[in-house]
Image: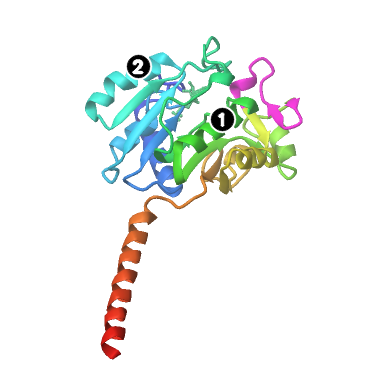
Amino acid sequence: MNLRLMQDSDPTFVDGSRNQVQRLYRAGLVPKHAVLDVGCSVGRTAIGLMADSQFQGTYVGFDVMPKQVGWARETLTPLDTRFTFRHLDMRNDRYNPNGSVERADLKFPVQDGRFGMACLFSVFTPFYKEDIALYLSELERTLRPGGRILATWFLFNDENRDVVQSQSAYPMKYQLDDVTLYNEEADRLRAIAFDETFVREMVRQAGLEVVKVAFGTWAGGPGPDFQDEVYLRKPGRSAPQLPALGRARRKAGRILIRAGHRLASDN
Ligand SMILES: C[S@@+](CC[C@H](N)C(=O)[O-])C[C@H]1O[C@@H](n2cnc3c(N)ncnc32)[C@H](O)[C@@H]1O
């Protein structure tokens, strides 16, 4: 299917779909979550979730490329109406250079506080830092308290900077500013890397927390993925704990009432 960005074969695409779902479970997906897929393209993650017999939740994907979103909407939503796809005409020099939405007007096309899990697979790897900061803040708005994010990045730090610049799968030979390196002079957003400390600070400023960073094999890290995986969380109690807490409160209440009866009959 020529809308696939990497021109993957069917088996490679399906394997990628399953792999993305496994990674979401590792990041804290629970089967009833509402999932937000930022930069969903033709719905690789959606296809994996549709094929996953455990998943009972809902899914919204959005992307800046209208053809990919249109294909997913026309082909995947009729198969399962829990899966919906939206278009956002945000500018991206590589994927949507004529986008009409300015940074100042950016708003994800979804409501506040709805999602238990958000994913961004290979989305921050062709993004400028100004857009990443805006997207982190929109993720904070649209996640439920306790909600999780899995985002992939290319990161560098004092330890791996030499490898990143000269021996990685995308040697980041060019410097944009103090915190940004990139791979190809004529196509900055082909692969762009950010200083890890700077990324952690952007996450903090957006009101989110870093849970874990798993350095990918692209720059000699242990993986499990090729890109660096960053697991994030919106602070607060996650919703799945609420019924359990309710049960615990009710049980504590019953114990207190029984204890009260006993106290009353002892007196
Ligand atoms: C490398 S592709 C990854 C697609 C998909 N996440 C996957 O794993 O198959 C990057 C995607 O990010 C999308 N994208 C680029 N800029 C975006 C933006 N500002 N907002 C949402 N998606 C964007 C592109 O259109 C493209 O579909």
Q: Is residue 51 visible?
A: yes
Tell me residue 188's x, y (percent).
65, 20
Placement of 136 over or under 28, stated as above or below: above
Residue type pointed to by label 1 = Phe
Judging by the rendered image, the residue that carries numbered circle 2 is 70
Q: Position of residue 98 (x, y in %)?
A: 54, 9
**Quadrant in the rendering for residue 220:** top right
Q: Residue at x 59, y 38 (%)?
A: 206
What sort of colour scheme is used for the picture?
rainbow
Give the residue at the far bottom of this rendering.
266
Task: Name the quadrant of the N terminus.
Answer: top left
Answer whether residue 62 is magenta in the image.
Answer: no
Q: In the rendered view, tell whether residue 181 sits above or below residue 90.
A: below
Q: Which residue reaches farthest front?
A: 267
User: Camera-side residue: 234 or 179?
Assistant: 234
- Position of the C terminus, as image quadrant, is bottom left
User: Element at badge 2?
Assistant: helix
Is 225 situated left or right of 184 in this image?
left
Whether residue 55 sits left or right of residue 197 in the image: it is left
Q: Which residues are magenta?
A: 176-191
Residue 11 picture location, percent across and down: 35, 31
Would residue 54 be found to the left or right of residue 162 on screen? left
- The answer to whether residue 167 is visible is no
Mark 1 lies within 8 Å of ligand 1 (Cβ measured): no
Report the residue marked by disc 1.
124
**Spot occupied by residue 138 in the image (x, y as percentages of width and height):** 51, 32
